[in-house]
Amino acid sequence: MNIFLLSIGWWNFAGSFMMLGFLYEPFGQNVLNRSTKLFNEKFVLSYWTKLWLFWASGLNIFFGLINIMAVKWGHVELKTFLVWSDLVAYSLFTTLAIWGLKTKKLGSGVYSVFVIFAGWMAWGIYCLSCSNF
C-alpha cells in the first residue's frame, strides 16, 4: 500500500506542474491537440481555462502530497481511506472520459487514459485486498 500511495502521490504531484504548463497556450495545444490527440476542439487559454488549471493543479498538489505524507504518518486507517478516495476519484475520471467520448469532444488519445486509470484502479483494489498494509 505504501508503494501505491507514494506512486500515485508523486504521479499527481508532478502532473499538477505539467497542468500549469498549459498556461502557455502553444504548449497546451501541442500536448492536448497534436501530440496526445486528447481533445478534438482546439485548446484555447481563456479566463475559465486559467481558473480551471489553477483549481485542478491546486487539488492535485494537495492530494498528491497527502498520499505521499500518509506513508510517513503510518496510520493504516488513513492510508485505507486515501486508497478508497483515489479509487473514487479515478472512477469519476473514467465516467467523465466516457461522457466526453459520447459528446464527441474528446479525440482518439482519450483511450490511453482508460488504460492508465484501469492500472491505478486495479493496483488500488489489490492494495485494499491485501491483509498486510
Image: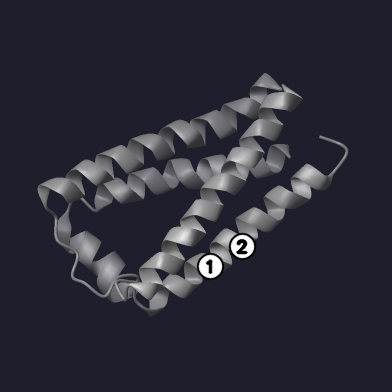
Q: Residue at x 50, y 52 (%)?
A: 92
**Which quadrant holds residue 110?**
bottom left
* Residue that label 1 marks: 114
- Which quadrant is the C terminus positioned in? top right
Residue at 34% x, 50% y is 18
Instruction: For mark 1, give the secondary structure.
Output: helix
Pointer 1: residues within 10 angstroms few (<14), some, or many (20+)? some
Q: Which residue is depicted at the point 65% across and 23% down?
A: 72
Q: Mark 1 touching mark 2, by CB under 8 A?
A: yes
- In-front residue for pair 43/28: 43
Quadrant in which the N terminus is drawn: top right
Determine whether 24 is above or below 65 in the image. Answer: below
Query: Which residue is under mark 2?
Result: 118
Percent x, y of residue 106 = 33, 72
Q: Give the side of residue 73 with respect to residue 66, left or right.
A: right
| Number of dots carrying numbers | 2
Query: Which residue type does callout 1 highlight?
Result: Phe
Mark 2 falls on what kind of element? helix
At label 2, counting other C-alpha atoms closer than 10 Å, the crowd grade (few under 14, some 14-19, many 20 or more) is some
Q: Amino acid at mark 2?
A: Ala
